[in-house]
Image (cartoon, rainbow, N blue to C red):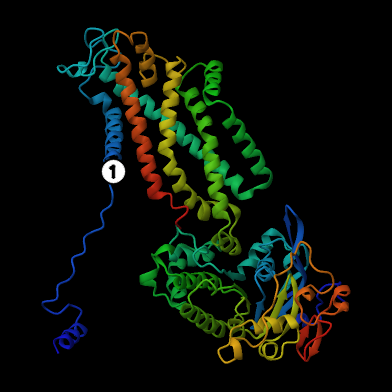
Amino acid sequence: MTASTALRTRKAGDLPAPGIQIPAVAAIRKPRSVLVWFSYFWIVLIVALAVLAPVLPIAGYDAVAGPPRQPPQFGPIDLLLGTDRVGRSLLSRVIYGAQVSLVVGTAAALGGVVLGLVLGLIAGYFRKGADTVIVFVADVILSFPALVLLLAISAIFAPSLWTILVGLAITSTPSFIRLSRANTMAWAGRDFVKAARNMGASDTRVLLREILPNVVPAIAAYLPLVIAALIVAEGSLSFLGLGIPPPTPSWGGMIAAGAADLRTAPYMVFVPAAVLFLTVFALNQAGEHLRLRFDRTLQD
Amino acid sequence: MSSLAGSGSAHLRGDAAILSVEDLEVEYHTAAGAFKAVAGVSFDLLPGETLGIVGESGCGKSTTGRAVLRLDPIAGGTVRYRDDSIDTASPRRLRELRRDMQMIFQDPVSSLNPRRSVKDVVTEGLAIDGRSKKERDERAPAVLEQVGLPSERFAGMLPRQLSGGQAQRVAIGRALALQPGLLICDEPVSALDVSVQAQILNLLEDLKKKYELTIVFIAHDLGVVRSFSDNVLVMYLGKTCEFGDAVEVYDRPAHPYTRGLLDSVPRPDAEGGFEGPALTGDLPSPLNPPSGCRFRARCPIAQDRCATEEPVMREIRPGQYAACHFPLD
């Protein structure tokens, strides 16, 4: 009797009968890694500091801010991370160095993305001769040690921001070619591409409207990983003295400058090395997180 | 019209046809060599007619459908659509022609771009045709409405939010938005649940009547084809076996392969669950097809003649054609 009443009541309206409790369902917990959130925090912090460097209350990167070879200490903000062998603030130089490292890494990676995406789309969609040539060129660049290539470029042209950018973009292009070519091939075989061609779409339209939007997320998710690798590459070049010419600071250059005093003043190497490490680590973490989040190649 | 030693074209009906396919050949090149997935298939369609193409997996029925649109390269034969020759059309002309011959695919999810909204998908054909955004926005609700999807709910959805049946409706809407003269359905329901299959078939049936569509309906489900088609074409290993009125062919198959196919359908009313013995053996490799009649290795009534001489399509009964030396009564 009570059961049937309850049933009737429930049928009559959408709300459950009084006394019947709506089951409380806990929200699904998403595992959130502390490391990932620290990584995003660090990236935002570094970018913000680099952008705001000119208005921050810190000494200029080439100005003497205190006695030389001061270890990190509390006190004046310019001495927070210590000073180098001529007394310039390591904090200021690390922040200005971030400008160079981030700009070089990001711009070169974006250049590589654009070039690699275009070539990968062409190779993966048209196949045949274009594919053979593009894959061959990519393989040649890949099989050539990147550092040697960069050294050659730096040796032939005078080291400057532009030669480094172009060199790093070239070394990052093949992996983007590979990635976008493989994705393009996978998407080009799908029926919606056939349907588009069947509606009279030109190759350009198919590539831009149907395939590109599906390839971009996979590429974009890979971008932070490449930026991280390029920051390290720029650091290596600067360490070898073929990077951004002094006095403009870069993290690699600072490590190189401090290397001579490693025994007596190790912080001169450790401070920029730690910042470089944290930034690259954070980019890798963020990249992996984005890849899992947006690379839906297999899911759609 | 004495055909090359192929499956023959005695069943073609001449100039009245909207689509006429003669001795169609499609070749695939593999590491093991080139083979003909379609080896001399002929059929035609009168306006408003529905042709069902049936056969086992790998018999070349889907390839035939794609080749009609030249989505697969045509290696031989001719395809005529209205006054145009598809096999020799220039790329520019082909693009125009394809717009008039739309295709519905087997996998509805794969046939929709996951990054574009339902509204974008169904109006893409109009966009390619150069219609303005305003016109497309006006057309989209009507297109969605005619395939049974309320526009206000579905227009903004992405394909991954749709069920298989809904996705197939979107694909049908996309094809019909161009008001095509010919619709090629490549196994449009075989990826769907049985209950949804019925809905989609009913929808196609309604649309067929409403717009007097000419349809090539490719399927391996014989029951689906019977209810849906006027004529049926049975294919085996890239060749035609039998052609005729769907009801006639089903009731009195002339080719032993058609008989075997029909007998393989489980029937609740038949003793033992089946009408007759099932087909034995596998489809032979198309790389090295049997000599003579391609079906002879699996044919219960094959004789010596079948190994030496390839049978040609001929009229067995009025309107019913089969490529067999020893047709069934």
Q: At which x and y percent is residue A70?
A: 23, 10
Chain identifier of the residue bearing label 1 in the image: A
Q: Residue furthest left?
A: A19
Please, which residue is most extreme toward the front here? Answer: B272
Viewer-side residue, A86 vs B242: B242
> How dense is the environment of label 1, judged by Cα within 10 Å: few (below 14), some, or many (20 and up)?
few
Q: Is residue A61 left or right of residue A174?
A: left
Percent position (x, y) of residue A35? 29, 38
Tell me if residue B259 comes above or below residue A214 in the rendering: below
Helix, strand, or loop for circle 1?
loop
Q: Which quadrant would the N terminus of chain A be assigned to in this image?
A: bottom left
In the rendered image, the vertical position of residue B129 relative to residue A129, given as above or below = below
Total count of labels: 1
Residue A285 appears in the rendering: yes
**Residue A74 in which image quadrant:** top left
| Position of residue B241 measured from the top left corner of the image (x, y, whole percent) | 75, 78
Residue A106 seen in render: no
* Relative to B279, A121 lies left or right: left
Answer with the quarter of the image where residue A129 lies.
top right
- Percent of width and height locating residue A254: 35, 16
Three-letter amino acid code at the position of disc 1: Ser
Q: Could you say which is closer to the camera, residue B153 or residue B143? A: B153
**Residue pointed to by mark 1:** A33
Q: Residue at x 37, y 29 (%)?
A: A102
Residue at 88% across, 78% down: B305
Residue visible at 59% across and 47% down?
A: A124
In the displayed structure image, the side of residue B66 where residue A21 appears, left or right: left
